[in-house]
Image: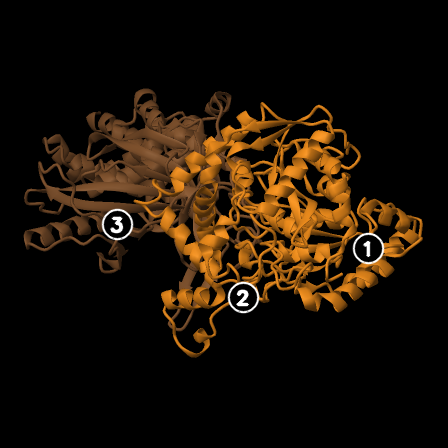
Chain colours: A orange, B brown
Amino acid sequence: MDFLQSDFVTLTQALKNKEVSAVETAQFFLRRVESLDQQLNSFTHVNKELLTQAEELDQKISRKEAVGPLAGVIFGIKDMLCTKGMPTTAGSKMLQNFVPPYDATLVARLKKADALIIGKMNQDEFAMGSSSETSTYGPVKNPWDTTRVPGGSSGGSAAAQASRLAMGTIGTDTGGSIRQPASFCGVVGVKPTYGRVSRYGIIAYASSLDQAGPLTSNVKDAALTLEIICGQDKYDSTTSDHVVESFSQNLNADIKGKKIGVIKEFIHDIPDASIAKNFNVAVETAKDLGAEIVEVSIPLTQYAVPMYYLISASEASSNLARYDGVKYGYRTPKDQSAQLSLDEFYCFSRGEGFGAEVKRRIMLGTYALSSGYSDAFYLKACKVRRLLRQQFIDAFKKCDIIMGPVTTTPAFKLNDKVDNPLKMYLNDIFTTSTNLAGLPGMSVPFGMAQQLPIGIQLTAPHFHEQVLLNFAYALENTQPALETRKLRPHVY
Amino acid sequence: MSTNLQGYEAVIGIEVHVQLKTLSKIFCSDSTDSTAGDNENISPISLGMPGSLPTLNSKVVDLAIKAGLGLNCQIRTKSFFARKNYFYPDLPKGYQISQYEDPICEKGFVEFFADGMEKKVSIERAHLEEDAGKSTHYPEHTLLNYNRAGVPLLEIVSGPDMRSAREAAEYCKTIRAIVQYLDVCDGNLEEGSLRCDCNVSVKKIGEPKLGVKVEIKNLNSFRFIEKAIDFEIERQVDQCLSGQKIIQETRLYDPDKNRTFTMRVKEDAEDYRYFIDPDLLPIIVSDEKIQMIKKTMTELPRPRAHRFVQQMGLTQDEADILISDKAIADFFERTSELSKNSKLSANWILRDVLGYINDHHLRIEQIKMSAQSLAELLILIDQKIVSGKIAKSIFNDMIATGESAQQIIDKKGYKQVSDTGELEKVIQDVLAASASQVAEYHAGKEKVFGFFVGAVMKATKGQADPDKVNELLKKMLKS
C-alpha cells in the first residue's frame, strides 16, 4: 500500500479488502508526523487516541459491519474546529487549555463516515492572517522551502497536506485562508458556497464569510470530502437545504465548449511576472481543452480588500467578545494575587490572551461598528458587498466559471510581511471577493515559479461545486499540472 | 396625588420585559424551567462556547406575534435579529441577541382607565431578545447562574405618554393583563417573568423639550411602581426647584425606605455597536400566519370589562379590578355563571376573595376554594337559606379549609330559620317577654322595632332570615 500516493477510495477499498489495516495506516502517518513535523510546526496537537480508534475501525471491518465512505482516511483538522475531548485553541493563548465537550458538525460528519482524526493543525491566531505566523504555537513553515511561509490562515493544514502528514486536511476560509495556502503549498483546496458546510462548532472569525473545506492531494479526494461535509444542519440556520450531489462520482473532465470567464480588472495587471506567466499558461491549456475564454468585468473587486477587512473585523470584534476569562480559556493570573475591578479583569485577561494581529482587528472592527462611524464603514461595506455579489451573478450569465490567479506572488519569506499589516492584507486581493459574494472557489496546483508551487483559482456560481470540481479535474490532468505533481516538497 | 408639582409635569415611558411562555430557550433546546438548580439549564449554546450557534425557537415568534396583535401593533413581515455588544460576566457571548432597527412588532397602543379617565398609551415597539444570566454579588466574589441566559423575552416599549405614577401603574397592569389573557407570559412580577423599567423625567408645563430621564429598575409590584415613580417625580421637581441638574442615571427603589437611590450613572451614552446578527436568518412572517394566530386569540381585557359592564351589570370600577388579572376574571365569570347572580358574585369576589388573597399574599390560583363552591354559597344566600352574616362565617371556613358550604353548615349546625311557624313562635315569646317595649312601640316609638329584631336574631342564634323576621314582626305587632 502506497500511503503517500493513495487516494481515499483506494485506501478505503484496501481496508475493506483487508489488504491493509487502519492501525497500519495510522501508524504510518503518526511516524511521519513524528519525524517531519519538527521542520514544519504544522500540528498543534496529535491525537493520542488515534491508534485505539483505528483499532476499533479494524474490528468493525473484521466484524463485517458496514463502514463509511471515508473509512480509515487520516484527516488533520484545523484548530478552528471543535473536536470533542481534543484541545481546540484557534492557535491562541486565549484558548490554550480549552477542550470542547462537543464536535463541530463537520468533524462529526467525518467521524460518522469513519474517517480518523490524526490531530489539530496550526494556523494564524483565530484565522486572522495570510502567513500562519501569528499562532501562539509559533509559525508554520512551507514544506517546499522552510524559510518561507505556507500561507494562511490554514497554513498548518496546507503544509501537512503537502508533506503528506495526513491524507486529507480541513481548513477554514474567510478571505482566502484555504485557497491561498493551498496555492503556496501545491495542494488542492476548496472553499464551498457560503451555507454549504455547517459552521456549528467552528470557532467564529467572521460569521458571514467563514466556510470550512478540504485540502487534499487531488481533486477526487476533495470531491469525496465535500460530499460528506456539505449539507443542511439544524444547528446552523445559515446552512442551505440545497441538494448535495455525488461530486466524486459525477467528476467529468470534459470542459469542451464551456466558457471560462477572466476578470478584466485582475488579469491585465498581475504584478508578479511568474504568476502572470503561469496564468497565461492556464488560459492556453483551457483553450486546448476546448474551452472558450471570455472577459468579464467586476469593477467592485477593486474594493474587495477594504470591504473584506471592514466586514470581517467588525464581525470578529463581536465574535471574540466571548473570550473574557470568565467561563473558559485564558484568565489573567493577576486575579489570584490582587482584587481586580471588572474592567481590569477584562483588560488583563484579553490583553494577555490575544496576540497583536487579533487585537488590531478587534480594534478596527470596534471602530467600524461604532455609532457615528458604522454608516460610513461597516454599513457602507455591507451595501457594496451586495452590489459586488450582484456583479458576480451578472458575470456568470456570460460564463460557466471564472479563472484567475490565487495570489500576487508565490510563497513569501517568513517575517517578510508580518510587521506590515497593510502589505499582508493586500496579499488577499484575488481571494476575498469570493467570500464576500458567498461563492464557491478553489485553488488547484498548476505550475511552478521560483521552485515553488502555485495554484490557479476557480470560482463558480453559488452551489455549483460540481462545475468547480469538474474544471479543476480537467486542469489537474493537463501537462503543466501533471509535471508539478511529479515534484516533491523539500520536507516529505 | 400627594406630590405638589409646582408648575412641573412628569413624563413617563415604560419598558416592560415579558418572559414568553416557552418550554425551551429562544436559541437552543435548554429548558426554561425556573425551578431548576443553579446552572442546570445550560449547554454549549447558552454558554456561548466557541463555535456554538443560535437557532431560533419558532414558538417564540408565534407568541411575539400574538402579543403584538394584543397590543394593537403592526407585525413586520420581515424583521431581523441584531447583536447588542457589551461586556458583562452574566452575558455569555459578550453580546445580547436582540432586535434593533426592525422589531417584529411596532406602532401599537393600549387603552385603560386611570383615575376615572380613559387613557391611551402608544406602544413604540415590541422586540424579541434573549435574557442574560444572573449575577449574585458577595464582598469577595460573584456567583453566576446562566439558567436565565437565553430565556425568550419580548421587550414592550411605550411612548413617553404617561403623566402620573397612577397612570404608569395602570399601564403596567394593562400590559400584564393582555399578556396573561393571551397566555404568552405568566405575568409574575415577583418571580421576574414580567419586569417593568420606568423612565421618568420632569419638565415645566408647556415646555416642549423633555427633561433628563432617570430609569428606575427592580420594581417587583404595581404598588412599588406607583410609589417609586411618585417619589422620583417629587425628587426631580425638588432638584429643579433648588436649581440642581438631573443626572441621567439608573436608580433602584427601596420599598422599606420608600425612596429611590442611584444604581449607576450613565456618563456617556453607551455604544452597543448594533449590527444584524449574521448567525440568524431574518424572521419572515406571512399574512397567513398572522391570520392563523388571530384565530387563536382569546378575548382581551378591555372587551371583557366592557362585557362585564354592559351585559352583567357591573360598574366600570368593579369590572376594571376583576379583569386586571385573568385568573380573577375567570374565577368571577365561572362563579357568576354557576350562581346566576353576577352582582352578588362581583361583590363577594371583590370584597371577600380579593381581601383574603391580599391579606395572605396569594394568587387566586392558590386558594382552596373553587368558583363552584363559592357559587354554591351564593345560591344559598340568594335563596335566603343562610343570612349574609352567617354566610360570611361559612365563607371564612370555606376559604380556609376548602370544604363546601354544605359541609360547613352541617358541621356547625348553621341554618337559616325562615320557616314561618317556627319564627312566629319565637316572635311570640319575644313580644311576650318585652311588654314595656311593645307598649312603647304602640305609643309611636318605632325605634324599638330594632330591639325586637335583635332579640329574635339572638333567640335564633342569628340563623333567622332577617327579611322574614321583619315581615312577621310588623304583622304580629299590628295584630
Q: Is residue A481 left or right of residue B190?
A: right
Is residue B41 shown above or below A399?
below
Say which element carries label 3.
Answer: strand
Q: Nearer the viewer, residue A489 or B57?
A: A489
Q: Residue A190 bears which disc, if any?
A: none
Which residue shows up at 69% across the image and 25% down it? A258
In this rendering, the answer to whether B405 lies above or below A49 is above
Query: Which-is-in-front pick, marks 2 and 1?
Result: 1
Instruction: Give x and y (percent) for residue B38.
Output: 52, 60
Instruction: Point out residue B221 in the picture as x, y percentages from the top left corner.
Output: 32, 48
Amino acid identity at mark 3 = Glu
Name the residue located 41 percent from the left edge and 26 percent from the top edge.
B299
Q: Which residue is mark 1?
A: A4
Check chain identity for marks 2 and 1: say if they share one.
yes
Question: How many labels, in total?
Answer: 3
Marks 1/3 same chain: no
Q: Which residue is mark 2?
A: A93
Residue B428 in view here: yes
Residue tagged 3: B215
Q: Please state which amino acid type lies under the numbered disc 2.
A: Lys
Query: Label 1 sits on what residue type?
Result: Leu
